[in-house]
Image (cartoon, rainbow, N blue to C red):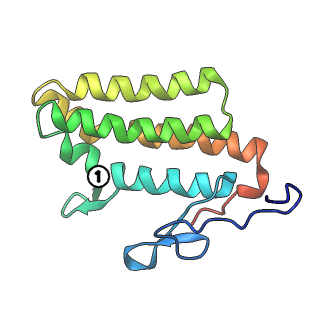
Amino acid sequence: MEDPQKPRPARPRPMQAGPAMEGRDGFDLPLGNDPQSIRRRIEAMEKVLERSFVIPGINRPVGLDAIAGLIPVVGDFITAAMGAYIVWEARNLGLPKWKLLRMAGNIAVDSAVGAVPLAGDLFDFLYRSNSKNLRIVKAHLDKHHPATQVIEQ
């Protein structure tokens, strides 16, 4: 019979390389539940959805949200689910319900208007719901978890 006072060894997590998952181009995706790790995951998701690459000529950053929005119905559903991940992570940080509802509203507006053919594609290009949600999370973290602040360049 095991001794209840003796701590059990932790199980190793699959695909874990130290404190973070090693991504493409040396980008580390943190796995922890601390505010700093959650902040970095949210920033990474926002970058994928809103600022993955720059359109040459107009120097406008676009991401998966605008690109997938070109695919009728399915694209908007996928990007809404990815945006909901940001809200879920914000919930894990303990954001108040009114901020979570505001974030969900940003995603709902983006998905609803983005579903309209042609006009919705232009709206997806201009309206950045995930960037707005990132600002809400950053404001909360800067106030309640000042150790997570990062000096922006």
Amino acid type, label 1: Gly
Q: Position of residue 115 (x, y in %)?
A: 19, 26
Q: Residue at x 43, y 50 (%)?
A: 46
* One can see residue 103 in this view: yes
Where residue 89 sits, quadrant-wise, is top right
Where residue 112 sits, quadrant-wise, is top left
Of residues 93 and 6, which is closer to you in this image? 6
Numbered label tally: 1
Q: Position of residue 122 (x, y in %)?
A: 19, 35
Badge 1 marks a residue whose secondary structure is: loop
Q: Residue at x 66, y 63 (%)?
A: 151
Q: In the displayed structure, does residue 128 sit left or right of residue 96? A: left
Of residues 67 and 29, which is closer to you in this image? 29
- Quick one: quadrant of the N terminus? bottom right
Q: Is residue 79 above or below residue 9?
A: above
Of residues 101 and 4, which is closer to you in this image? 4
Q: Residue at x 72, y 67 (%)?
A: 9
* One can see residue 127 in this view: no
Q: Position of residue 44 (x, y in %)?
A: 46, 57
Density class for disc 1 (Cα within 10 Å; few <14, some 14-19, many ≥20) is many
| Residue for badge 1 | 63
Q: Is residue 96 above or below residue 47?
A: above
Name the residue at the right extreme. Answer: 5
Q: Position of residue 12 (x, y in %)?
A: 58, 69
Q: In the displayed structure, does residue 121 sit left or right of residue 141? A: left
